[in-house]
Image (cartoon, helix red, strand yellow):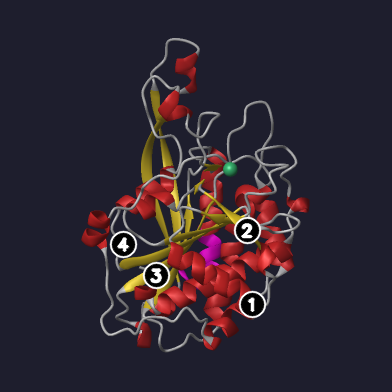
Amino acid sequence: MREQLLALALLTPAFLAVTAWRCPGVPHSSGAIREDAKAIASSMSVDVATFTADLNWMASSPHPMGSARQSEVTSYLKRRVEESGARAEVQEFKAEVPNPAALTGPAPLTRVVTGRNVYAWPDRFETGDQTGKKCVVLIASHYDTKNVEGITYTGANDSGSSSAALLQILRHLKSVPFPPEMRCAIGLAWFDGEESTLPGWSDGETSFPKKIVDNTWGSRHAASQSFSRDLAGLVLLDMIGSPELRITRDAHSTSSMMKLMESAVDALGYPSSLLTPDFLPVEDDHVPFLAKGIPALNIIDFNDLSVWHAPGDEPLRVNPKSVEKASRIGVLVSLMAAMDPQAIR
Ligand SMILES: [Zn+2]
């Protein structure tokens, strides 16, 4: 992802009117965090042993979209989801990406690679008293690494920390009873191909001869598809393992969800300094959903960039306590959204 100097006007009222979803008869939230949701979020802990094992496995070598290693990571995530007792779904897509060889000699401008998004659907929502839920809130991460010329970049923080965090969140959500007021299910998504295949985030659009959006491949595909339930909201986690977590207030994120995050930070007993005072527009996997009128929040530490896309982004530098903080906040915002989806529109 990258910061953006000028905020894009992604949402237009006309667009929202077409895609807006309303849950009838739900009282509008006062913004206060519910005690039952808080109890679920605050009882979530990162199990350091399994977290580290998942992180070490994923961040042991580079795994950009379309690589042989990335298909192994796909299989790993699918297996870990199934081990948790949830239903795994792999969404395959073809991405026509820039061909770097075309920049240095005669070669086709593009090449086609296979990308795969992975979803976890906790089965409690498929059967029993949870049957009939009409909407879903997604907690998401990307799980590819950037191909960085000249170095071995394995992406422990970007994207291992949030990918392994989702497995921890899944384990927790499978183990706790949900409040009966849950109106939406919660699902988890690991997006492929967030990183640009060319060196710069926007090179595909600015300097490549055939103008191509060369980032957020998996999330753009996901946002273009219909889900079996209405997608009520998206909570994205990215780069959450820095030694001292400091969450960037992302200017693109839906303001109602940003307010929920502020309330969640306070309810969970974290200092308000956990959030940066200033807003910064960050382009990331939530943007394609915002463009479809889906409320979305990006929980990202875009302050500590000392090892970003650099060899030092190693598992030993990832702080499980930072991951736990961001995960609890993400879970709490997701629960609140799932209980009152109208409040985040
Ligand atoms: Zn990155």
Mark 1: which secondary structure?
A: loop
Q: Which residue is mark 3?
A: 344
Q: Which residue is mark 2?
A: 277
Mark 3: which secondary structure?
A: helix
From the viewer's perspective, is the residue at label 2 or at label 3 nearer?
Answer: 2
Q: Nearer the viewer, residue 256 or 210?
A: 256
Give the Cα separation between the discs numbered 4 and 1: 31 Å
Disc nearer the start of the sequence (2/1): 1
Give the Cα separation between the discs numbered 2 and 3: 22 Å
The secondary structure making up most of the magenta span is helix
Amino acid type at circle 1 is Leu
Disc nearer the start of the sequence (4/1): 4
| Residue 268 badge | 1
Q: Which residue is mark 4?
A: 227
- Residue 106 percent coordinates (x, y): 42, 10
Mark 4: which secondary structure?
A: loop
Residue at horizontal 23 percent and vertical 61 percent from the top? 17
Disc nearer the start of the sequence (2/3): 2
Disc nearer the start of the sequence (1/3): 1
- Residue 253 percent coordinates (x, y): 46, 57
Of all residues, the one furthest to the top in this rendering is 105
